[in-house]
Amino acid sequence: MTQAIFQHFGTKRLLGLGVFALAAIYLFATRPVPLQAEQAAGRTVPVETVFRVVAAENDVARKLWTADIVGAGTKAGLKFHEKWREPAMEAGPLPALFLREASTALQKTRIPLGLFLGSDFPISQSNRFTGIQADHFAQLRNTGEPEFFNATDIGRFTAIFPDRAVAPGCVTCHNEHPNSPKTDWKLNDIMGATTWSYPKERVTLEELVQIVAALRTSFGSAYDAYLTKVATFERPPEIGDKWPAEGYFIPSKRVFLAEFERRASANTVERLLSLAEARTASTSAGR
């Protein structure tokens, strides 16, 4: 069914609709007649699935920000710094701080999805993993695979995904930082882990769509914070359709999010449709 839907809409049109519109139309239009309580589990998905979806979305956002804004922007004359919020600092947030902006924005939504970037060699000690999370991160460092567990100390289901040095700037920044406890990082090293948490073990597909929507809104809020800072520069870059790779430019929020959606949506839509198909099949089998 998924393949048929993609053929019907066409790939370009499908991505143009966006994950939210398509998922909402498909999931709600095909919602089955309410089932008995004992069948309710068939209409939900495990939180591990949620974590895998949001982690994939985050990977796209981080790579887009790191390579296309920070990396290319630095070459074009833009600056990025850990103290970017100080009034006298004409700079934008480093990749980890862009994620922190998104995390802060996410906390202000009604969606109880937690987002945290930690490490065993953090520049800031507040980002050091402790307790059960440190134990699971040690396992992740050994295997390179994400860890899923119930963090009983905080009462939340939790997942940690490897956060790798995806661009030369990541390596240079950490190796040269005066407070870095490790100065021999290499490209593609696991530098830390992105931690996600949620209070429920299972969610409905509708909840999953809402979670993805909230996360994307948070990325937009993080980019808004950068645009607000840019407006205070003595010589602000031109904001519009061009990217730093083309010179002293940065994309507008609309252009930035459109590129993010182009890169992220195919994978996310495929996951959502697969889940919806499984639900439809389960419902049909139970009739």
Image (cartoon, helix red, strand yellow):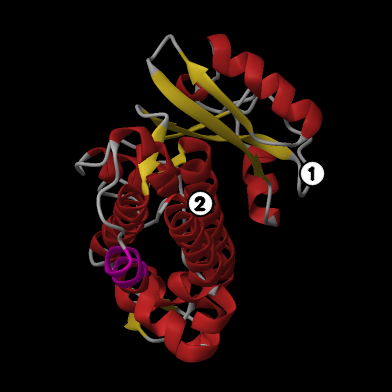
Amino acid type of the residue tagged 2 in the rendering = Val
The numbered disc on residue 53 is 2
Residue linked to disc 1: 186
Q: Find out whether residue 40 is within the magenta segment.
A: no
Whichever of labels 2 and 1 marks the residue nearer the N terminus, that label is: 2
Q: Which of the 4 quarters of the picture holds residue 128?
A: top right
Q: CA distance from mark 2 to mark 1?
A: 27 Å
User: Which residue is at 48% across, 70% downward?
Assistant: 265
Q: In terms of secondary structure, where does tag 2 sit?
A: helix
The image shows residue 223, relative to residue 170, as above or below, that is below
- Farthest residue, direction front: 287
Find residue 217 and report its horizontal and vertical position in percent. 29, 58
Q: Which residues are magenta?
A: 23-30
Measured from the top left, where is residue 163 in percent x and y?
63, 41
Main SS of the magenta part reads helix
* Picture quarter with the C terminus: bottom left
Pick whichever, 42 or 92, lies toward us: 42
Q: Amino acid at mark 1?
A: Lys
Is 17 situated left or right of 248 in this image? left
The image position of residue 248, as x and y in percent, is: 45, 79
Closer to us: 129 or 11: 11
Please report the residue visible at 51 percent of the width from the left and 67 percent of the height from the top.
264
Please tell me which residue is depicted at 43% across the width and 9% down the height of the picture.
153
Q: Is residue 114 visible?
A: no
Neighbours of disc 2 within 10 Å: few (<14), some (14-19), many (20+) = some
Label of residue 87 in the image: none
Residue 63 position in % (x across, y down): 57, 60
Q: Nearer the viewer, mark 2 or mark 1?
A: 2
* Left or right placement of residue 4 versus residue 204 in this view: right
Q: Secondary structure at mark 1?
A: loop
Q: Which residue is at a point 53% across and 65% down the rendered structure image? A: 64
